[in-house]
Every structure is written in C-alpha cells, then in structure tokens.
C-alpha cells in the first residue's frame, strides 16, 4: 500500500514537466532555425556584392584598356587628341557586363616633349537597386 501511494505521488508531481521540456526544445530549435536563415541571407548578400564588385572592376579595366588603345593605336603614332575627360561607355553588348557602364577621364601632361597620360576609369554595375563601383587608374607615357 505504501509503495502504491509513493507511485501516485510521484506521478502527480511530474505531470507537466514533459510539456515544459517540449516547449523549451521547440523554442531553442526555432531560434536556431531563425539564426541559420539570417546567416544564409547575409551570405547571399555578400555573394551578390562580390560578383558585382568583380564585374565593376572588369568594367573599369575595360574602359582603361579602351582609352589606352585609342591613345596608342597599333601601327600608328600617338593620338593625343583622344585624351578627353568624361567619356562614358555602355557595356551592354558584352556578356557578363550587361548591367555595367564605365566613365573614363584622361589627363595629359607634357614635359620636355614627352607626353604623360593618366587614365582614370570608373566601372559601375547595378542590378535591382544594388550598385557597386571600382576605380582603375593607369599611367602611360609617349615614347618620343
């Protein structure tokens, strides 16, 4: 009889503990899931900026190379008239750079019949209101 009473008392005092434990586990798992979703969203955003940054850098490189090709065309002499400021190129026809543009400035300084050029190219890419830009600056001189 004493054993039966002890078992009843033990059963009655532990009646809600499994419910509390289950709720605790659900809350902890929900918090872990929310943290994981937030980390994934942050990683996605970082990846987008990394890709846009790489594209903007390549756009800036493209603009600088284009301006240098205009200044120093193959098989001809220097064409310093191409050193102008504020040239803007659209790169919409280049695969991978179709949401990018580039602005190129050129500065010429002459010293003792030698021309020194500073070409500054700013590449900018924008997709869905996310924009990134990179700057490339190249210095060159004529071989006079």
Image (tube, rainbow, N blue to C red):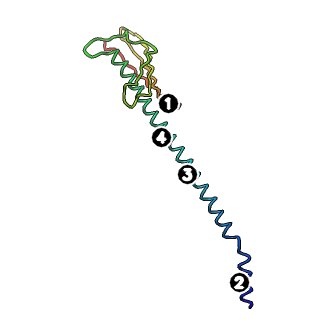
**Mark 3 → mark 4, Cα distance in angstroms:** 17 Å
In the image, which disc is placed on residue 47? 4
Tell me the SS state at disc 2. helix
- Which quadrant, please, contains the C terminus? top left
Camera-side residue of 137 and 132? 132
Front residue (pair 31, 134): 31
Task: Say which residue label 3 marks.
Answer: 36
Residue linked to disc 1? 132
Residue pictured at 55% horizontal, 51% vertical: 36
Residue at 40% across, 25% down: 92
Q: Which sits earlier in the primary sequence, circle 3 or circle 1?
A: 3
User: Real-space Cα distance between discs 1 and 2?
Assistant: 70 Å
Distance between the alpha carbons at the discs numbered 4 and 1: 13 Å
The CA distance from mark 2 to mark 4 is 60 Å
**Mark 2–mark 3 CB contact (< 8 Å):** no
Disc 4, SS: helix
32 versus 87 height, above or below: below
Q: Residues within 10 Å of mark 2 (few under 14, many from 20)?
A: few
The percent position of residue 112, horizontal first and vertical second, equals 37, 8
Dot 1, crowdedness within 10 Å: few (<14), some or many (≥20)? many
Disc 1 and disc 2 in contact, CB within 8 angstroms = no
Report the side of 73 relative to 1 (left or right): left
SS label for mark 1:
strand
Residue that lies at the very extreme toward the bottom in this rendered image: 1
Of label 4 and label 1, which has the lower sequence position? 4
- Residue 121 x/y as whole percent: 44, 22
| Label 1 or label 2, whichever comes before in sequence order | 2
Circle nearer the N terminus (3, 4): 3
Camera-nearest label, 2 or 3: 2
């Amino acid at each position: 009889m004493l054993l039966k009473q002890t078992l009843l008392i033990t059963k009655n005092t532990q009646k809600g503990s499994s419910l509390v434990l289950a709720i605790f586990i659900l809350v902890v798992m929900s918090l872990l899931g929310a943290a994981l979703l937030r980390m994934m969203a942050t990683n996605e955003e970082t990846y987008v900026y990394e890709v846009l940054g790489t594209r903007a850098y390549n756009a800036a490189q493209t603009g600088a190379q284009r301006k240098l090709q205009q200044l120093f065309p193959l098989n001809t002499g220097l064409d310093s008239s191409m050193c102008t400021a504020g040239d803007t190129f659209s790169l919409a026809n280049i695969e991978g750079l179709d949401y990018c543009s580039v602005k190129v400035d050129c500065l010429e300084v002459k010293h003792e019949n030698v021309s020194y050029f500073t070409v500054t190219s700013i590449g900018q890419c924008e997709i869905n209101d996310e924009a990134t830009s990179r700057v490339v600056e190249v210095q060159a001189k004529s071989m006079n």
